[in-house]
Amino acid sequence: MYRLPLSGIRVLDLTMGWAGPYAGRLLGDMGAEVIKIESARNWDVTRSLHLLGRDEEKGYNRSGYFNHLNRNKLGCALDLAHPQGREQFLKLVALSDAVMEDYSDDVADDPGLSDNVLRQARPDVILVTISAHAKDGPVAGISVAAALCAALLYRRRTGHGRWVEVAQRESLASLIGEFFVGFSMNGRQPPLLGNRHRSMAPHGCYPCAGPSEAGWLAVAVASDAEFAALCRIMGRPDLTADARFADVVSRYRHQDELDEAISAWTRGKTSREAAMVLQEAGVAASPVASVADLMEDPHLRARGFFEKTAHPEAGVWDTEGVPWRLSLTPAHVRLSAPCFGEHNDYVLRHLLGLSAEEVAELERQGVTG
Amino acid sequence: MTPETAEDLPLSGFTVLELGEGVAAPYCGKLLADYGADVIKVEPLEGDPARRHGPFPDDTTGAGLPHPEKSALFLYLNTNKKGVTLDFSTASGARLLRRLVEEVDVLVENQPPGRLEELALSYRELAHVNPRLLMISVKPFGEGLYGRWKATNLTSFASGGQMYLTGDPDREPLVSAGYQAEYQAGLNAFAATLAALLGLAVMEIGQHVEISAMECQACVLENHPPDYAYRPSDALSRQRGSVNPVLTLEEALTSPQMKARCYFQEVDHPLAGRWVYPGPPFRLTGGPPSDGGWGWRAGRAPLLGEHNEEVFGELLDLARSDLVRLRAAGVV
């Protein structure tokens, strides 16, 4: 089989929502065998968030949200609240490298499935707990994926599994660290700047021509040379000679007038045209891309960023590829998101070695439905 | 809480060379260092540009005056690293850099697109020097049509799709505070580095990892591409909302939960002083006591060129007189 960095790593993913599932998706992208475990009693909330009508047959397999966040995973339906489900789950833990969960009240604090119980099933298992706050955004999921990889590296060196804890608020605070250090220095909240910058000017977002109101262009000018290039492209070389805009400090003081002059130019161009000519002249500029813009962006298309993904019930659609480009082991969308319980046979019969009768019995008891 | 040695941290034993400027690659390097890797940061002789960006501590007049050793941005993004200065655009500097590359597992860089290629320091060339090298390139767009485009955090936030979704729907799109596009690229680079390190055991050979900030953002949009593909109308994506943290900085710093978890930690620095820094984005508990309890360490940023003698002298075995010559030639 084609080798990926995490080939041979099995992760049981009990998370739902955004952060945990995005982490599982990234690990799946990198080649881990990620088995998403849900139950009919407690399935991933994003299965219910879809744009199809509620009476749509099996709409839970067609949610755009769910299918977006859960590609490159297998799906198994197993009710962990049921003693039989728990028993099968612990057998599965014995065969797995890591367990990710984000419903601590149900799992980690539950005497039935504590860290200790998991460790009895598999002494070096890595347990990743995402705090309740982490159910919100996918960005925290990147930290979760990194945390699990760090624990795997540690285990490889020492043989010991760790309990990994990710609190969303903490992982997001890490992305604005300089504000905290700055606040501790001076006790001041920095002023809100909108689209402006402490030192660069012009620095903003300008309205463009286009079929709808959708066109905006972001421009950031860092130096005199870049400002001269901007003025040349706008056909306003006179601005460089204007005392109000002659240097960094004066441009900063007269930003409002500068923004007007730039808007007058951008209104006559589409955001893409404007970005192209400014970039050719060495000025940092970009269209403010909407999802629709990204889907047809020539740079992303030429890089093969979007991949056609066929889902057995949701159809064929373009989905983002893998954001980490590894030269020797390029990763792709190998699996569309699982339908509910799609891989029960693989998990229960192939991995756990249950007989057809045993599987049928679990189904009768409502453990796997 | 903070260990003296890093032997028991999750990334202990890995060595990293960082050619990072600003936010993206330095944040990746910071996380690698905070979780135990030995990170050598290479700065140009005048220092990482982040040293020129504030906030800076107030002086007696109440104004935060710029000082290269006192930038909160730099201090935060470069904790636990060793710092060396090196002008690798000179032939002598490039030679030294290649020798450093021989010694490390990972090279993380966010040099302006094309710069390393012009200096014959591309992945292809460096892989000759060290076939097991993992080179992580964090770029605004990545190779391709926009490969050489200039970018700042503002334009990067715009190109990845996050800006369009931020702000008041009746007004122009808004960039969020700080350097979100760059931080997110750095966070992705960090996670990808760890995955690639795990893969190294399987592959037995290094590889090049490219991170495009644009693609990283496009993967985490609220109104994501499949949703759009399902129902191609931009009715949804025209809605905007704020992604800024709602707590004030002071509320977060004094939050009982953050306090109880000891999230914020004081770190001393010989020139900048003793200030409060955010803690780990994740904790690895259940390790040996010597790992600080979280698999993470607090630490400070290096002074400009602080570890030149240690790194060039001890690691590369240069004589003191050689170092003097390199200094005189403006290489170090």
Image: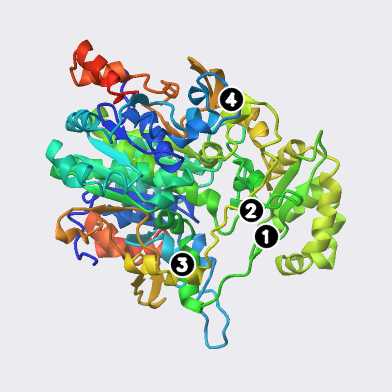
**Gap in angstroms between the C-alphas marked 1 and 2:** 7 Å
> Which label was assigned to residue B175?
2
Instruction: Answer above or below: position of B225 versus B254.
Output: above
Can residue B274 be seen here?
Answer: yes
- Provide residue B244's location: percent of width, then percent of height: 57, 57
The residue furthest front is A365
Return the x and y of residue A369 as percentages of the image width and height: 35, 23
Whether labels 4 and 3 share one chain: no
The structure residue drawn at horizontal position 36% and vertical position 62%, both measured from the top left corner, is B279
Q: Which residue is mark 3?
A: B252
* Residue, disc 4: A302
Residue B227 appears at what percent x and percent y?
A: 59, 30
Q: Amino acid at mark 1?
A: Gly
How dense is the environment of label 4, judged by Cα within 10 Å: few (below 14), some, or many (20 and up)?
A: few
Element at badge 2? loop
> SS at mark 3?
helix
The amino acid sitting under disc 4 is Ala
Horizontal side, residue A35 vs residue A354: left or right: right
Instruction: Name which residue type carries label 2.
Output: Val
Q: Amino acid at mark 3?
A: Ala
Q: Taking A153 as reference, is A301 above or below it?
A: above
Q: Position of residue B294 (x, y in %)?
A: 25, 57
Lower position in the chain sequence, tag 1 or tag 4: 1
Q: Which residue is mark 1?
A: A194
- Residues tagged 1 and 4 counted as in contact (Cβ below 8 A): no
Chain at tag 3: B
- Marks 1 and 4, how far apart at CA: 33 Å
Which residue appears at 26% of the width and 32% of the height? A82
Residue B327 falls in which quadrant of the image? bottom left
Do marks 1 and 2 both belong to one polypeptide chain?
A: no
Distance between the alpha carbons at the discs numbered 4 and 3? 43 Å
Nearer to us in this view, B34 or B210: B34
